[in-house]
Amino acid sequence: MTQTVPSWVTGTFGAEVIGVADATTGRSVNDLVVLGLRRNRRRAHLLVSTVLGKHIPIPPSVVRGAADDLGDVVLGVLGPDLARSATVVGFAETATGLGHCVAERISAATYLHSTRRSRPGAQVHGTFEEGHSHATTHLLQPSSPDLIAGPGPLVLVDDEISTGKTAIEAIAALHRFAPRSHYVVAALVDMRDADHVAAADRAATELSVRIEFVSLATGRVTLPDNLIDEVCNLPPARLNPVSPTRGTVTETHAEWPDDVPDGGRHGYLATDATAFHRAADDVAAAVRERLDPSTPLVVIGHEEFMYLPLCIAERLESAGLDVRYQTTTRSPAHVRDVDGYPLRRGFEFAAPEFDPDARRYVYNVSASPAQVLFVADTPADSAELREPGGLLDVLTTAGHDVMVLVVPETVQSVIAKARGAR
């Protein structure tokens, strides 16, 4: 059954999302995305996920449920034995947490996510490009080059497949580095048209590999020819709301083992899972003691740092707190406070990791007073985070009480040494 997803964007500009209900997963595109806009000459529309926890704050259990469903689809393609030998790669910045959830759901041997972060001393073992993204270059920084050269299939995870071009470029780059015969591309929604599907088939033939695409739902986006001009001509969005009462800031630092990865930037092995989740339990328990259980809580992760904040949010939700989860982003989107539009409230702030020309964003943080738990690793524990116009300033100006939780950064050379000693 074909369904059209209604939105303010559809009614105003004529762009629309058309989806097909998936009998296998029980999901449809209108369950998973809503059309938004961004002022970008490469691509003016934005598929805002309702289950990812990026632009829209949602219960962490909803995020995990959608990711587990996607993992189950991957398991249906690979089977449990082949899945356990797989390497899973999540795309920065949006799918780093989604990819990690999928990797754990299928019990994959290795998880790695791409990154836009370049740190002194961190070695890059591969790159690929994403043409429509606000930040285009993906870096691969496993703790050692052989981490992604496993014997099993490679599963690439993204929140959406628009054309498949980014996935194909990633496969080509990874194939040069660590060739294998079988690739799976998994996403919450697949919006490719027939030409995009044919291009992927040609790429598989040229590489002499098998490439399978799987998703929770399929559909397509139809855009008017003048959409980019119309969106770029919109008046600037009204950002950074102001409350009569300023919120407060408290800060705490987590204890985290330096031989346990805090996520997938430098690789996460199946053998890391027990120590990771034990450490996440300890952090969440310590934070819970400092939160007001009677006040709604928004847990905000820092850009690519999505999975550990999700795990902390899950534990707080299980403890009975009213929790929503989301993360900040590099991507500027158009904010408009109208019914039927998914980006109703927005904040713009200086990048916490020093970048003098860069801005960062977070959307839809509750309009009602809520406590905020901002979870970041040490590179974001900076003067820019605290300065006027920084994240803490704009959130407290909006009336939110913010607790900053800083987790020690996983260092590539340290985790490599620890793995070599095991």
Image (cartoon, rainbow, N blue to C red):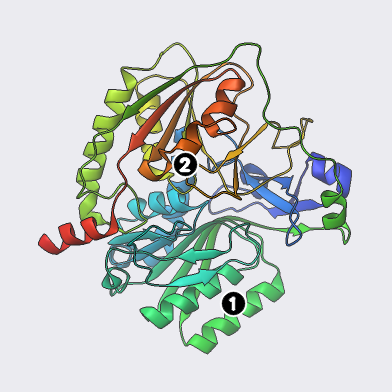
Q: Is residue 388 above or below residue 150?
A: above
Q: Secondary structure at mark 2?
A: loop
**Residue at 49% from the left image edge and 79% from the top image edge:** 172
Q: Is residue 321 visible to us here?
A: yes
Counting from the top left corner in percent of width and height, residue 21 is at 65, 51
Amino acid type for the residue under numbered disc 2: His
**Tag 1 or tag 2, which sits nearer the N-term?**
1
Q: Is residue 369 above or below residue 37?
A: above
| Quarter-of-image position of residue 242 | top right
Q: Nearer the viewer, residue 98 or 405?
A: 405
Counting from the top left corner in percent of width and height, residue 375 is at 41, 35
Q: Which residue is mark 1?
A: 200
CA separation in Å, label 2 and label 1: 33 Å
**Residue at 67% from the left image edge and 66% from the top image edge:** 192
**Residue at 53% from the left image edge and 67% from the top image edge:** 213
Q: Is residue 195 above or below residue 417?
A: below
In the image as oriented, which residue stretches furthest toward the left? 421
**Crowdedness near tag 1: few (<14), some (14–19) or many (≥20) residues, C-alpha within 10 Å:** some
Identify the image quadrant of the C terminus. Answer: bottom left
**Crowdedness near tag 2: few (<14), some (14–19) or many (≥20) residues, C-alpha within 10 Å:** many
Counting from the top left corner in percent of width and height, residue 273 is at 24, 48
Counting from the top left corner in percent of width and height, residue 233 is at 87, 49
Identify the mark at residue 302; answer none if there is no mark.
2
Q: Is residue 285 above or below residue 230?
A: above
Q: Nearer the viewer, residue 101 or 228?
A: 228
Q: Is residue 1 visible to us here?
A: no
**Residue at 37% from the left image edge and 42% from the top image edge:** 377
Closer to the eye: label 2 or 1: 2
Identify the mark at residue 49; answer none if there is no mark.
none
| Quarter-of-image position of residue 373 | top left
